[in-house]
Amino acid sequence: MQQIINFIIRYKNFLLYIFLLIISLGFTVQSHSYHQSSFFNSSNWIAGNIYQTSFSVTSYFDLNKENKQLIEENNRLRDQLFNRENENPTELDSIQMNYTIASGKVIKNSYANLRNYITINKGEKNSIKIDMGVITAKGILGIVENTSNNFANVQSILNQNSNINAKIKNTNHFGSLVWNAKSYNIVQLIDIPRLVPLTIGDTIVTGAMSSIFPEDIPIGTIKKFDLDTSKSFYTIDVALFNDMTNIKNVYIVNNINREEIQQLEAETNDQ
């Protein structure tokens, strides 16, 4: 307490000046409308900037929560998209569930090897199984090859062993999507007959012959094509929609009927 009193005595002239200055400014603002307006405008500007900064800081720390909510919403929308019975289902109850969707994140990604793999943070405890399809918001990514309790390895489409059914959008002309290991953003669509009309920029999507991916998931666009005259089939370079060097959020697609389809096909082949 004595220190406070000593401080006031030592700086009494300065403190008196500050006190009188505040009083004079108050009288000036109250007696002149222009000064009053300027004062409140300045106050509003300062308060507005403080609120804006506070909002920006709060929003930054809320990004993780908002991102999680967006991913959950995307899951729900993709469930509806992949399971629709017709183009315009009138009721959600009319949708027959053929696919389930789970979200995950990439924790390791390779794209410069001959056989590239992606590790995701979901595994057997999340009901992830071998041969489930993995996609992003932009297109297909690969197929689950191995699983552990908490993680799964995905065979990337940038893998020499990858072979996925694909087609030219809005047609029934399909072939096999493979990779020649020359570029991380280009894959090849083969076995397209020479009679099929092709145009640079045409969209390539997943085909209906796959029991792993739903039909019409985007893959990329035709960059160029060459005709193998000895076989009368095109080899098409497809520029991927996905940036394979920058993958974070993924969706794991499970075809509920896949095992039944495989069992039926195996019984048919054994006859």
Image: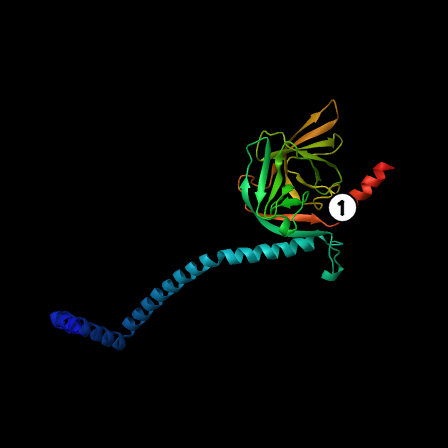
Using the image as rendered, state which of residue 159 and residue 203 is in the foreground.
159
Residue that appears at 76% across and 60% down: 94
Q: Quadrant of residue 119?
A: top right
Residue that appears at 55% across and 56% down: 68
Q: Quadrant of the N terminus?
A: bottom left
Instruction: Report if residue 141 is visible in the image.
Output: no
Instruction: Report if residue 7 is visible in the image.
Output: yes
Using the image as rendered, state which of residue 54 and residue 123 is in the foreground.
123
Q: Quadrant of residue 193?
A: top right
Q: To which residue does mark 1 refer?
A: 259
Q: Position of residue 44 (x, y in %)?
A: 35, 68
Using the image as rendered, state which of residue 268 and residue 215 is in the foreground.
268
Q: Residues within 10 Å of mark 1 (few under 14, many from 20)?
A: few
Q: Position of residue 83 (x, y in %)?
A: 72, 53
Check the image and report above or below for 72 versus 270: below
Looking at the image, residue 17 sits to the left or right of residue 223; the answer is left
Residue that appears at 49% across and 56% down: 63
- Element under label 1? helix
Q: Position of residue 249 (x, y in %)?
A: 56, 48
Q: Position of residue 97 (x, y in %)?
A: 73, 55
Residue that appears at 55% across and 45% down: 106
